Every structure is written in C-alpha cells, then in structure tokens.
Amino acid sequence: MSLAEGLLLAVLGFITAVWGYKLARLWASLLSGIALGYVFYQYSSYELQALLTPLVLFIIGFIAGAMIGFAIFKLAISLVAGFAVAQSLISAGLFKANEISLIVLTILFAMILYAVVDKLLALVFVIGGAALLFIGLLLTPLPMIVTIILVFLAVVLGLYKNLKK
C-alpha cells in the first residue's frame, strides 16, 4: 500500500473511532427512509398516486422511514443479537430445541442486550477505528511511538465522545 492509501485508511479509522456509532445510526436511518420511501412510491394506490405525485409519496415515506429507523436502531440490534445468542445456546444443546424456548430466550437476551447495546457498539466502533488508524499510520514514516500515541489519543477521544451521557 502507498502512503496516500495509508493516510486515507488512517483518516477513515479516526472517523470510525470517534463518530462510528453515530454514523451507523444515521446510516440505518437513511436506509430505512429509502426503503419505506420506495414502498410508498412503488406500492401506493393509483388514486393516491393521482392525488400526490410519486415523488411526494417517496418523500413522505422517506421521512417516516428515517424517523422509524432512527428510533428503533437500538431495539433492532438488540433483537438480532438476542436471537443470535439464543440460537447459539440452543444449537449447543444447552436448551431444548423448540420455538417457545427460542422466543423466550431471544426476548430475555434482547432485554439484557438492550441495556448495554449503546456501550458495546460504541466500543466496537472505537476498537475497529483504532485498528484502522494503526494500520494506516504504520504505512507512514512516523516513528512507532508517535503512532501508538496517536492511536491511544483516538481511542480516548472515541470513548469520551461515544460513552458520555
């Protein structure tokens, strides 16, 4: 990799470490808005399309979808992670394999994860961003001690920005 690629990787790593969780919520909101906007645009009745143009329907769906996506981001991640944990425990044979145990365990783990998902995701983005920053800075002629100090500062800043309330 070249110096320019290393610098780009370092910048992306810093952005991910400091603002990654907030960017992920924004991205989820945008995708939800686009999806619901498309549904409003594509599947609305002919009468409604005659009253409002398809572009207006898309904009209404986009705004509604973006607000819904932003609001349920934490819940959706908790449910998906709760399902993954429940399915893993059932697959390992620790619980009886049936739908009732899967649903109960999914809800139980989703409730537990809901309480900590903000902190865990922030930590994941800080660690991932710091790793990208470190790899990017290794491709520059900076001394190793400077690289380590910069990565440490990015981790501290990322944790401060993401975990303060």
Image (spheres, grey):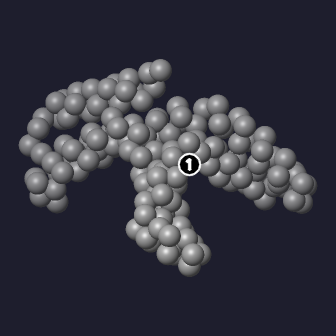
In the displayed structure image, the side of residue 3 where residue 155 appears, left or right: right
Residue lying at 44% horizontally and 71% vertically, measured from the top left:
54
| Residue situated in front as seen by the camera: 147 or 118 | 118
In the displayed structure image, the side of residue 129 where residue 140 appears, left or right: left
Is residue 31 among what the camera can see? no
| Residue situated in front as seen by the camera: 7 or 44 | 44
Residue 158 percent across, percent down from the top left: 35, 30
Residue 105 percent across, percent down from the top left: 81, 46
Residue 123 percent across, percent down from the top left: 46, 35
Residue most extreme to the bottom: 46
Is residue 130 among what the camera can see? yes
Residue 64 percent across, percent down from the top left: 52, 52
| Residue situated in front as seen by the camera: 153 or 48 | 48
Residue identifier under label 1: 68
Which residue type does callout 1 highlight?
Answer: Ile
In the displayed structure image, the side of residue 42 where residue 161 appears, left or right: left
| 123 w.r.t. 31: above or below | above
| Residue situated in front as seen by the camera: 114 or 33 | 33
Q: Secondary structure at mark 1?
A: helix
Asked which quadrant contains residue 78, the reply is top right
Residue lying at 58% horizontally and 37% vertically, measured from the top left:
117
Residue lying at 40% horizontally and 68% vertically, measured from the top left:
55
Residue lying at 16% horizontally and 60% vertically, measured from the top left:
1
Residue most extreme to the top: 165
| 65 w.r.t. 143: above or below | below
| 93 w.r.t. 165: above or below | below
The number of numbered badges drawn on the structure is 1
Q: Label 1 crowding class (10 Å Cα cut-off): few <14, some 14-19, many 20+?
A: some
